[in-house]
Image (cartoon, coloured by chain):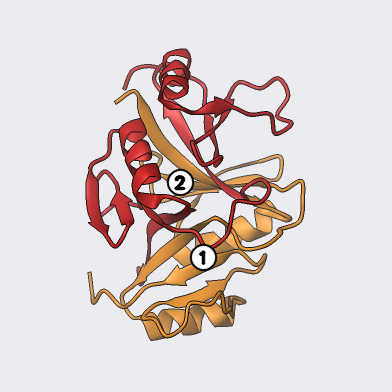
Chain colours: A red, B orange
């Protein structure tokens, strides 16, 4: 294929700090860091996550967000809250996934437990 | 690892239509479709892209976007424009990548040619 999905780019007030936070969340190594930009990912051949400086404040709910799949939802949500994530209400109601925001307010979801890999 | 990055979720006015557009862009199969939601991806063990109904119009530039890596940037940009993408100016200036918007206005970048796989 002539076109490959290479990465998700997240604009951040503090890309180096937010990128390190997400690296810890996902257990990803820091693959590249330069001029305050930071890339994390499991492997350079797979989609990575790239943090770059934002030129504006976050306004409203993001139109794109990440979904995370836990082996143990309750334990992972607890770990994320300890790390500085917070619960948010985006009108999701009573659903099986948990909606959190990262330290810069970016919404993401922790899906139902998938069981052990 | 107890937490796996599972997918990017894109809220869309017409998720089935936009998902099919992106499936064609990336050469991905449609992995799941239900209640107007649609998932595309290379493999269920890798991050997928999930399209779900938006509850609001797109407002301003997205804080998250996708970067695509082409074997031939010029040819791929031409193909994307033929498919309905359009050039946009987000103040990128004179850079090596090309900034486009998908049919719902979501910004994405086509990076410099990486050469043949």
Q: Callout 2: helix, strand or loop?
A: strand
Residue B42: where, in percent of width, then height? Answer: 39, 51
Q: Is residue B104 above or below residue A69?
A: below
> In percent of the image, x 59 and y 75: which residue is there?
B85
Between A37 and B114, the one lying in front of the other is A37
Crowding at mark 2 (Cα within 10 Å: few <14, some 14-19, many 20+): many
Q: Classify residue A7 by image quadrant.
A: bottom left
Q: Is residue A94 left or right of residue A86?
A: right
Q: Chain letter of disc 1?
A: B
A29 up-or-down from B63: above or below: above
Q: Position of residue A57 (x, y in %)?
A: 59, 54
Res. B26 image quadrant: bottom left
As measured in the structure, the alpha-carbon distance from the residue carrying label 1 to the one carrying label 2 is 14 Å
Q: Which residue is mark 1?
A: B24
Residue found 65% across the figure and 44% down from its top: B37
- Residue at the image position 72 percent from the left and 55 percent from the top: B14
In the picture, the disc for residue A91 is: none
Residue B31 in view, yes or no: no
Q: Is residue B117 above or below residue A21?
A: below
What residue is shown with label 2? B48
């Amino acid at each position: 294929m002539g076109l490959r999905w290479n990465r998700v780019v997240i604009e951040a007030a503090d890309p180096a700090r937010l990128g390190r936070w997400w690296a810890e969340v996902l257990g990803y190594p820091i693959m590249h860091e330069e001029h305050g930009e930071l890339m994390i990912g499991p492997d350079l051949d797979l989609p990575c996550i790239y943090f770059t400086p934002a030129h504006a404040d976050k306004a409203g709910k993001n139109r794109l967000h990440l979904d995370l799949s836990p082996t143990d939802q309750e334990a992972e949500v607890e770990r994320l809250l300890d790390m500085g994530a917070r619960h948010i209400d985006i009108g999701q109601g009573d659903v099986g996934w948990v909606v959190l925001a990262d330290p810069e307010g970016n919404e993401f979801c922790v899906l139902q437990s998938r069981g052990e890999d």
